[in-house]
């Protein structure tokens, strides 16, 4: 189950504010102000199936995520595609190809997906926004396109992107699209554009 997926500003604040842990919960607000004054933008694409009543958001899209099987992003000179291991919980069968997908193209400051009505102890970001399925194709920083990758909240490197430290070292995931399908209920998606 995915409780929350953050990319961009929210993830930067969550992970990078760890150095201020001694401040308690105020570290989030303190570092958020620092990060807002030095905003980063990230390239990427969001494909989603809107919930009823939200069909007008984004542009119509016939394809969901085009980057699977792309050339090796860690070593672009290799033509051999990355072999992606697919595993996990197999829930109800969902025909993703025949859904009414919409898309939004970056650059983005932040993308925040969560399946609870709050994002923090005092944050109810978008309580009425809903989505049925979601694909995030993350990209690099706009001001430094050589930096990409995914790290966990505890600092563990999950995926290494082009130009990252020890790029040739194996990681738990490939730096590629993330797909989330909501089995029951609806998830909340918040992204300031």
Image (spheres, grey):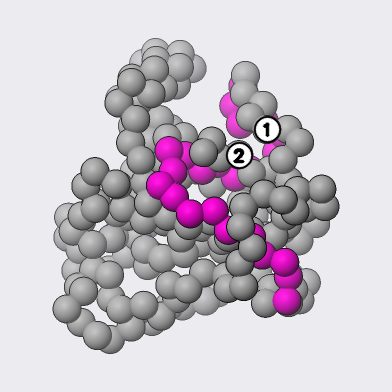
- Up the image or down, 193 lies above or below 179; here it is above
Relative side of 29 to 93, left or right: left
To which residue does mark 2 refer? 190
Q: How many marks?
A: 2
Q: Position of residue 133 (x, y in %)?
A: 67, 60
What is the span of residues highlighted in magenta in the rendered image?
Answer: 98-121
Q: Residue at x 67, y 49 (%)?
A: 57
Q: Position of residue 24 (x, y in %)?
A: 45, 15
**Residue 181's quadrant in the figure?**
bottom right
**Residue 120's quadrant in the figure?**
top right
Q: Residue at x 30, y 78 (%)?
A: 71
Does residue 170 appear in this view?
Answer: yes
Does residue 21 appear in this view?
Answer: no
Q: Residue at x 32, y 64 (%)?
A: 171
Which quadrant is the N terminus positioned in? bottom right
Front residue of 105/149: it is 105
C-alpha separation, residue under disc 1 versus residue under disc 2:
6 Å
Q: Earlier in the sequence, mark 1 or mark 2?
A: 1
Whether tag 1 and tag 2 are in contact, CB under 8 A, the answer is yes
**Residue sitting at the far bottom:** 80
Q: Position of residue 127 (x, y in %)?
A: 73, 33
- Up the image or down, 66 lies above or below 2; here it is below
- Up the image or down, 150 lies above or below 121; here it is below
Numbered badge on residue 58: none
Q: Is residue 127 magenta?
A: no
Relative side of 91 to 167, left or right: right
- Which element is circle 1 on? loop
- Up the image or down, 3 lies above or below 31; here it is below
To which residue does mark 1 refer? 126
């Amino acid at each position: 189950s995915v409780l929350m997926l953050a990319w961009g500003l929210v993830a930067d604040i969550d992970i990078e504010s760890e150095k201020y842990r001694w401040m308690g919960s105020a570290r989030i607000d303190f570092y958020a102000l620092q990060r807002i004054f030095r905003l980063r933008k990230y390239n990427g694409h969001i494909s989603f199936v809107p919930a009823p009543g939200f069909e007008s958001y984004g542009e119509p899209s016939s394809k969901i995520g085009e980057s699977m099987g792309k050339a090796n992003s860690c070593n672009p000179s290799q033509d051999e595609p990355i072999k992606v291991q697919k595993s996990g919980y197999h829930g109800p069968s969902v025909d993703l190809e025949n859904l009414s997908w919409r898309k939004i193209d970056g650059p983005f400051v932040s993308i925040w997906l969560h399946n609870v009505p709050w994002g923090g102890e005092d944050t109810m970001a978008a309580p009425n926004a809903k989505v049925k399925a979601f694909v995030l194709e993350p990209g690099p920083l706009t001001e430094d396109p050589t930096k990409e990758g995914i790290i966990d909240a505890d600092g563990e490197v999950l995926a290494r992107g082009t130009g990252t430290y020890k790029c040739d070292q194996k990681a738990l995931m490939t730096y590629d699209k993330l797909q989330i399908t909501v089995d029951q209920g609806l998830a909340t998606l918040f992204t300031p554009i």
